[in-house]
Image: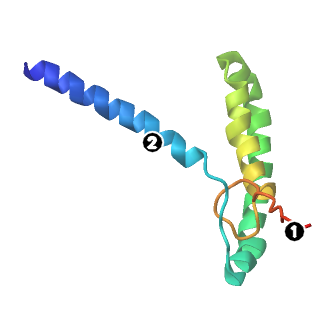
Amino acid sequence: MTRKISRTLMATLAACLMAFSSLGHAQAVDETPSALAMTGDALFVRPALLATTIIGSAVYLVSLPFSALGGNAGEAGEVLVVGPAKATFVRCLGCTRTGKKPETVEQSDN
């Protein structure tokens, strides 16, 4: 009896966790950074992320033969090169989340 209740609770918990985890990934970037956040991002964060992208590319090239033999060259490239490059170049100035802001479309009253 206790085992059946335990399994039911675990299945319910797993279903809830899987259902709610996708909601966080579906949200668009909706941030309005301050002037201080934009300045700090432009002066400190972007150069550091650019350096991370360059160093990650070098590490990827050095580790490519080993990751190719291991079968995870694509995953290594995603983590070491693509991730930092997206954080560097595909993010609004001062935003903390990677991604583009959605285009705003104005409606005319004609």
x 48%, y 41%: residue: 21
Q: Nearer the viewer, residue 43 or 34?
A: 34
| Image spot of residue 75 (x, y percent) | 68, 30
Asked where in the image residue 19 lies, by quadrant, the reply is top left
Asked where in the image residue 80 lies, by quadrant, the reply is top right
Under circle 2, the secondary element is: helix
Under circle 1, the secondary element is: loop
| Image spot of residue 18 (x, y percent) | 44, 34
Question: Is 78 situated left or right of 7 in this image?
Answer: right
Question: Is 47 situated left or right of 95 in this image?
Answer: right
Image quarter of the N terminus: top left
Seen as rendered, the residue at the extreme left is 1
Q: Which mark is residue 20?
A: 2
Amino acid type shown at disc 2: Phe
Q: Is residue 97 above or below residue 79?
A: below
Nearer the N terminus, badge 1 or badge 2? 2
Q: Is residue 86 above or below residue 37?
A: above
Q: Is residue 59 above or below residue 73?
A: below
Amino acid type shown at disc 1: Asp
| Image spot of residue 35 (x, y percent) | 72, 83
| Image spot of residue 57 (x, y percent) | 79, 43
Q: How does the figure colour the protein chain or chains?
A: rainbow
Q: Which mark is residue 109?
A: 1
Asked where in the image residue 105 lies, by quadrant, the reply is bottom right
x 65%, y 67%: residue: 31
Label total for image = 2
CA–CA distance in space, label 1 to label 2: 39 Å
Image quarter of the C terminus: bottom right
